[in-house]
Image (cartoon, rainbow, N blue to C red):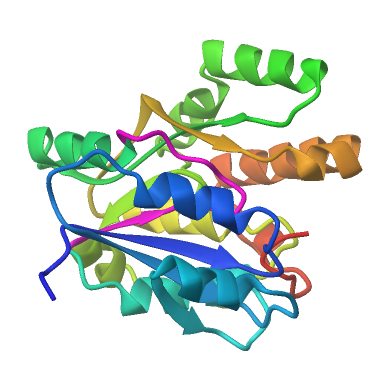
Amino acid sequence: MSQPTISIVVPAYNEERTLPTCLDSLCGQNCSFPYEIIVVDNASTDRTADIAMQAGVRLIHEPRKGVGLARRAGFAAARANIIASTDADCIVPANWLAHIQQVFTERPSFIAIGGYALYHDAPPYLHFLTHITNRLNLFQAVGKIARRQPLSTQNLAVRKSAYEQVGGFDPAITSPLGLDDVDLTLRLSTIGSVSVIPDLVVWASARRFRKEPVKTVGYRWSNYASYALQKRGVFRQKTADVRL
């Protein structure tokens, strides 16, 4: 088996409905280098594991409940020097990996990069809010306040050496909305350059927003505000499944 250039980690909990489309997009990448896809089954009770096996990707199991633990297990299993991350309900464009590789090649000082997530199943109001957020670069504005760029594991890539240097994802962070990615960004930013790449885009599901729109938006932005102030205590909450 050839050494992959990029490893992709996809944590999954009961994602039998969304995982096939995600894996189709990952398996259909238009790139000239080898890569591996790692699905981390986080104690699913549906056909998530079967779907991953049928797709021919690497499947590992993390029986302990929590997205941070699942991601940590996937990153530990990665064989490539660059590790990318997305969610099981995301769809990535065909040039996603090629774009990631290009950025890291052209900018050797970058240790981690991320991009935006748009919504493939959102109501019109959410498309509008997402458009405004991206146009105003609000997440980058938060990064400027904190002098760090917050990245999301929906659309993130990091050099394995840097990830290991900072100790990886913190297993103590078990917030219902994750935020382990924000904490990781905070620590990565202390050792090197972390950047948001505006045209590095994936398509995500808006199911959380449809279910609890006010709570989801409010909770997410309150945590980003706390991140900007470098307060980490808010991240540590009750253990949560990979996806709500």
Q: Position of residue 110 (x, y in %)?
A: 20, 42
| Residue 33 seen in the figure | yes
Residue 84 sits inside the magenta stretch: yes
Q: Residue at x 62, y 88 (%)?
A: 63
In front of the other: 70 or 190: 70
Percent x, y for residue 17? 70, 56
| View extreme (bottom): residue | 63
Residue 73: horizontal and vertical position, in percent?
A: 45, 79
Looking at the image, residue 109 sits to the left or right of residue 77; the answer is left
Image quadrant assignment for residue 178: bottom right
User: The magenta stretch spans which residues?
Assistant: 81-95
Residue 184 placement: quadrant: bottom left
* In the image, residue 23 above or below residue 195: below
Q: How many marks?
A: 0
Q: Residue at x 73, y 41 (%)?
A: 222
Side of 2 relative to 100 (left or right): left
Q: Is residue 36 above or below residue 64?
A: above
Closer-to-camera residue (39/86): 39
Instruction: Reply yes or no: does residue 160 show up in magenta.
Output: no
